[in-house]
Image (tube, helix red, strand yellow):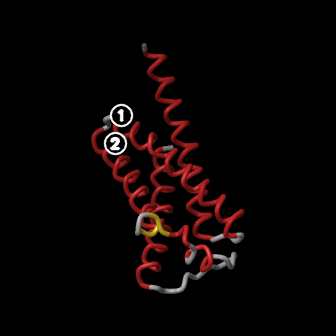
Amino acid sequence: MLLIFLLISFVGFADAVYLTATHYTGANVACGVLEGCDKVLASAYSVFAGLPVALLGVIYYLLLITLLLCYFATKQKGFLWAAAAFTPVGFLASAWFLYLQIFVIKTLCFYCLISAISSTLLLIISLYILWKQKTKTTLLA
């Protein structure tokens, strides 16, 4: 399950890096299935405190990857708990941006949906991991 967590974090990271790079280079986003990417990424909601929201996503996913790699290297559960503790932040941010896309901007961005799906899966997996860890601890106590 931890490898799936890591893989999904990498998917989210790659997605956010792509959007950040297109923001700073001014390149057009290859939108694919949906055609609202440019509108969403040009909206006032695509920037927070002067930074592209995608860059905040890069930091978020990189933090999760780093914490998980530290856990793999040390087996210290604090790293695992910290990674799991951050997943609600990503989920809530994605839920907010999904709300904005649907009800305010009135169009969807394919890459934003990838991030929303990634953060939702990471939250679910982290809850499962924490539940399994708690069950193991309870059973051993």
- Quadrant containing the C terminus in the rendered view: top left
Q: Amino acid at mark 2?
A: Tyr
Disc 1: which residue: 77
x%, y% of residue 42? Answer: 56, 78
Is the residue marked by circle 2 packed among few (<14), some (14-19), or many (20+) residues within 10 Å? Answer: some
x%, y% of residue 78? Answer: 34, 35
Q: Residue furthest left?
A: 74
x%, y% of residue 6? Answer: 45, 52
x%, y% of residue 5? Answer: 49, 49
Q: Amino acid at mark 1?
A: Lys
Find residue 43 and report its image quarter: bottom right
Disc 2: which residue: 71
Q: In the drawing, does residue 67 fall left or right of residue 42?
A: left
Sequence-first tag of 2 and 1: 2
Real-space Cα separation, disc 2 to disc 1, in angstroms: 7 Å
Placement of 129 over or under 27, stated as above or below: above
Task: Please state which of residues 29 and 46 is positioned toward the viewer in this rendering.
Answer: 46
Q: Secondary structure at mark 1?
A: helix
Q: Are marks 2 and 1 in contact (CB under 8 Å)?
A: yes
